[in-house]
Amino acid sequence: MDLTPSSKDKKKTPKQSMLLCCKLYISESRNKEALDAIERAAKHDPETVTVNKFEDRAYNRVRYTLVSYVAQDSTGCPIYSPLHQTVVAMAEAAYAAIDLELHSGAHPRLGVVDDIVFHPLARARLEEAAWLAKTVAADIGNHFQVPVFLYAAAHPTGKALDTIRRELGYYRPNFMGNQWAGWDQPETLAEKPDEGPTSVTRARGIAMIGARPWVATYNVPIMSTDVSATRRIAQMVSGRGGGLPTVQTLGLVHGEDSTEIACMLLEPNRVGADRVQNRVQMLAAQEGLDVENGYFTDFSPEMIVERYYKLISAESD
């Protein structure tokens, strides 16, 4: 499928066909003033487009999907993307408006700016996404004095996000057995971060920043409050638990009367949502639990590119 702009659209420039996508995860969804401040910062550069926003009040977490171009020098090395300053501006707004010590939710997190991941789109390469991840990480680490851990293509050895998270205690709830609240990790890190200090500011926490090929996120609601059963199902669905390869899962409380299996499909063209849904339904039936149809939390890469071109064109009219 050709994802470059049509020849009829004379307002597009060749550089815009080399696109990067940033998914920015922030630990807040209940404080409208904080979200408003972050979204004002998202308009820092009109060449960066917010193509989607996904909020979850039970998780107290929001994800912004941002797209812009990446420019290269004469040797083909990346030198500039409007995403750089936009993401840094949004992080600055988040740190100013959110105190991790006062935050709680049903989704794990280790920082106000919890995760930033860059994906190549259209004609861009993974190397360009990794360059931008490392550039943003240096700014967040140094300007805001936040420890930053790089992962996947942005890490020197390609270290996986889930490996780093396990080392840092990301998956262990610290409140009511199924919630995450405040900061309860050591304030001096045992592992040296890739950027920023080794000491943690409790109000800001730490950040994960990486680059990798497209990852789909797909959640399956379980109509039960039995989080232990949901966690068992999640483990058996995951590749780590002997289930579907390239699938990572979390079994989480989701509201007052249900739980949910949050899935990351690391290679969605290899193992897609249909296989995940079928496996969850089969395992849930063995537990005597009902399952609703799952849902993606973001658009496909093709849809994101299409929305970007429509929105950037509308803004230039």
Image (cartoon, helix red, strand yellow):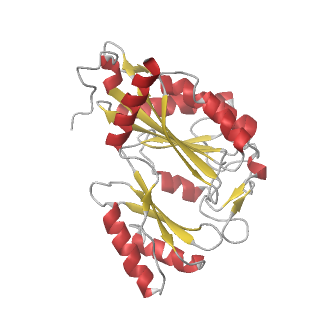
Q: Is residue 63 visible?
A: yes
**Where 295 falls versus 3 (above or below)?**
below
| Picture coordinates of residue 2, whole percent (x, y) | 22, 33
| Horizontal relation, residue 110 to residue 284: left or right | right
| Horizontal relation, residue 244 to residue 179: left or right | left
Pick the quarter of the image with the N terminus.
Answer: top left
Residue drawn at x 67%, y 44% as measured from the top left: 112
Q: Nearer the viewer, residue 40 or 18?
A: 40
| Horizontal relation, residue 131 to residue 198: left or right | left
| Picture coordinates of residue 237, whole percent (x, y) | 40, 71
Residue drawn at x 59%, y 80% as measured from the top left: 226
Q: Which residue reaches farthest right?
A: 102
Q: Is residue 76 visible?
A: no
| Picture coordinates of residue 295, whole percent (x, y) | 43, 60
Quarter-of-image position of residue 256:
bottom right
| Horizontal relation, residue 168 to residue 174: left or right | left
Q: How many marks?
A: 0
Residue drawn at x 31%, y 12% as measured from the top left: 74
| Picture coordinates of residue 125, whole percent (x, y) | 32, 33
Quarter-of-image position of residue 177:
bottom right
Pick the quarter of the image with the C terminus.
Answer: top left
Q: Nearer the viewer, residue 281 or 240?
A: 281
**Where 165 falls versus 75 (above or below)?**
below
Q: Nearer the viewer, residue 62 or 116?
A: 62
Quarter-of-image position of residue 34:
top right
